[in-house]
Amino acid sequence: MTIVWGTTVKLIVLIFAIIMPISSFAQSQQIPKSVLDDLARDLSQVNQAVLRARKLQDAQLLSVSQPEQGVGVITVTNTSTNVHAGASDHSATIEKVVKGDTFPVIDKAGDWYAIGLPKSADGLNAGWVNAANVVPYTTANWDITGKLTRAVLDPVIAEFTTLAAEMKQKWAGNEYVSITGFSISIVPPDLSVDFYFK
């Protein structure tokens, strides 16, 4: 008889670490304790990666302040728009952005939005765009992933993908456990492991 166990990592770890009902199932199926312990260690490692990713994501989200007006993001509407070092047309242009680009709003001063840049431009991580060249959106209308930089998302995706691949390879051909799939969520970070006892 095959039972499929597909759930989030924290629930799997909870099952192994606290409740242990799988243990009685495993004993009835003659699954060695060493196999269960090894699987529990792997799931715990995945859980620790998820907790690290959530802490990193939370830290970045807290570092991006919202202006009082409630604008969370702007989308560029002009074909080409200058990003300035200050809130003035006379400030140095540090970058050009194009129609459709979306940026988190850090502050607002008059007709200018301070935006977070995905990569440093002339040593700055933020710049100013004129409100006439953009459309603002409130936080409620904006997907939170827009606030997260590639510097946070890429390592999380890479770590989750690597862990999933290593775990699948490690358990391939095991006579007691089969890893059947993984599911990665970015916001909030999560890595679900689908497996079953043979």
Image (cartoon, grey):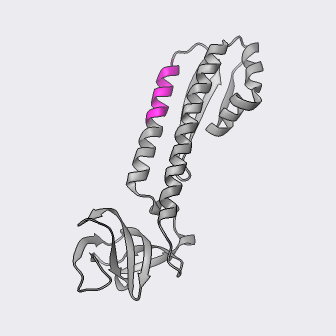
Number of callouts in the render? 0
Quadrant of the drawing holding the C terminus: top right
Residue 90 or 182: which is nearer the viewer? 90
Q: Quick check: 78 left or right of 169?
A: left
Q: Within the image, what quadrant is residue 80 found in?
A: bottom left
Q: Give the residue at x 45% y 62%.
A: 146
Quarter residue 123 falls in: bottom left
Give coordinates of residue 15: x percent, y percent: 71, 31
- Magenta residues span 162-172
Whether residue 13 is situated above or below residue 90 in the rendered picture: above
Question: Residue at horizontal 59%, vertical 20%?
Answer: 38
Residue lying farthest to the bottom in this orientation: 110
Residue 166 falls inside the magenta stretch: yes
* Quadrant in the picture for the N terminus: top right
User: What residue is at 44 percent from the left and 39 percent from the top?
Assistant: 159
Q: Which residue: 62% across, 14% down?
A: 34
User: How far across and down, in percent of the image, does residue 161 sit?
Assistant: 45, 37
Q: Is residue 161 left or right of residue 119?
A: right
**Picture quadrant where residue 105 is located:** bottom left
- Which sits in the foreground, 146 or 1? 146
Q: Is 115 located above or below residue 108 in the figure?
A: above
Instruction: Please check the rendered image and state whether residue 138 is part of the magenta-colored stretch, yes or no.
Output: no
Percent of width and height locating residue 56 = 49, 51
- Compared with 140, 17 (above or below) is above
Majority secondary structure in the magenta region: helix
Depth check: give the residue in front, 187 or 179. 187
x and y percent of residue 115 in the render?
38, 72
